[in-house]
Amino acid sequence: MAPGGSACKEVLESYSTDYDVAMAKLDNNGTPTRAITGSGGKQGIYSTNGVHELLECPVCTCLMYPPIHQCPNGHTLCSNCKIRVLNCCPTCRFDLGNIRCLALEKVAESLELPCTYQSLGCNDIFPYYSKLKHEQHCRFRPYNCPYAGSECSVTGDIPTLVAHLKDDHKVDMHDGCTFNHRYVKSNPHEVENATWMLTVFNCFGRQFCLHFEAFQLGMAPVYMAFLRFMGDENEAKKFSYSLEVGANGRKLIWQGIPRSIRDSHKKVRDSQDGLIIQRNLALYFSGAEREELKLRVTGRIWKEE
């Protein structure tokens, strides 16, 4: 028994790998690779000499970042897994205690590694401790599925997601930069916290998602329509759009910049960044009887010069 250690009574058979932030594994083929200069990294030879194997957590097999913990026998693991294994070393079953592996943390400082999304087009390399921060904002990282009707876990590039929306979610595809949609609901008083994505528009060679939702804004039931751009925020700013709804000589108009699908539909909705229609007004637009919701939403998308 190692000094200060005590054997754990239970043997842990499996471990969770659901990190809050995905940490990427390195390519360990042992062949140095030259990276191209990019916007955030630098050009050079990144390290694949096997040192990175020492930095892989034995539980989740992902790269470890400070604090890196070790047991009295020198076995290391990451801070997330230290909690998950109940402070018991998964290799020798001794209590982990609170020992930091400062030497390994120092070794990591000397490494330069490629971005995890190298296969998707990012050719930058980064110091070990800068790599994770870059990957959280890398413009080549996959997009989440923008479908708002369910919690979809599919990720990918834009062409992949467009095909996924069409084939798997059966979303209507529309070519053109103007639109005219009519939404009808037989009993609008039953519609609360509902979500619909009406269509995807192919416009200027890019794709835009039109959302229409019903939810409670404070105590008031409202409808909301807004547009999201299938791409990054800096590209979304090159476009503008307008939405219009009305009837009986009255009209509501919204004009804005589409939000990137990097922002979830809930984030856009909660920021009220779109056309908001109070339910009473929506029913007034629908007709005097107010027994059926009939809203016609028109709009257009244009490119800023």
Image: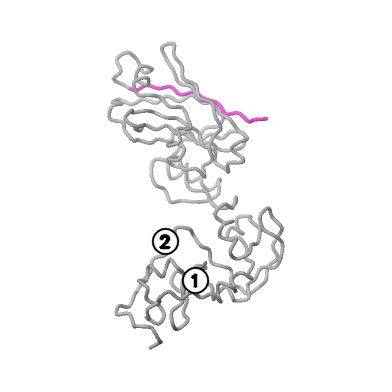
* Structural distance between the alpha carbons of marks 1 and 2: 18 Å
Task: Provide residue 171's location: percent of width, then percent of height.
Answer: 45, 38
Q: Is residue 155 above or below residue 242?
A: below
Amino acid carrying mark 1 in the image: Ile
Question: Is 283 in front, or is 29?
Answer: 283
Q: Is residue 40 above or below residue 283?
A: below
- Classify mark 2: helix, strand or loop: loop
Task: Provide residue 52's location: percent of width, then percent of height.
Answer: 57, 73
Mark 1, other Cα within 10 Å: few <14 / some 14–19 / many ≥20:
many
Question: Is 62 in front, or is 219?
Answer: 219
* Horizontal side of residue 115 vs 144, given as left or right: right
Residue 126 quadrant: bottom right
Task: Check residue 303 for magenta coloring.
Answer: yes
Task: Provide residue 287's location: percent of width, then percent of height.
Answer: 35, 15
Question: Is 113 in front, or is 194?
Answer: 113
* Horizontal side of residue 96 vs 235, given as left or right: left
Magenta region, residue range: 293-305
Q: Disc 1 designates what residue?
A: 68
Foreground disc of the pair 1, 2: 1
Magenta residues, dominant SS class: strand
Q: Disc 2 designates what residue?
A: 18
Q: Are marks 1 and 2 in contact (CB under 8 Å)?
A: no
- Classify mark 1: helix, strand or loop: loop
Q: Is residue 98 above or below residue 225?
A: below
Q: Earlier in the sequence, mark 1 or mark 2?
A: 2
- In which quadrant is the N terminus drawn? bottom left
Amino acid carrying mark 2 in the image: Asp
**Residue in view at x 46 percent, y 27 percent:** 275
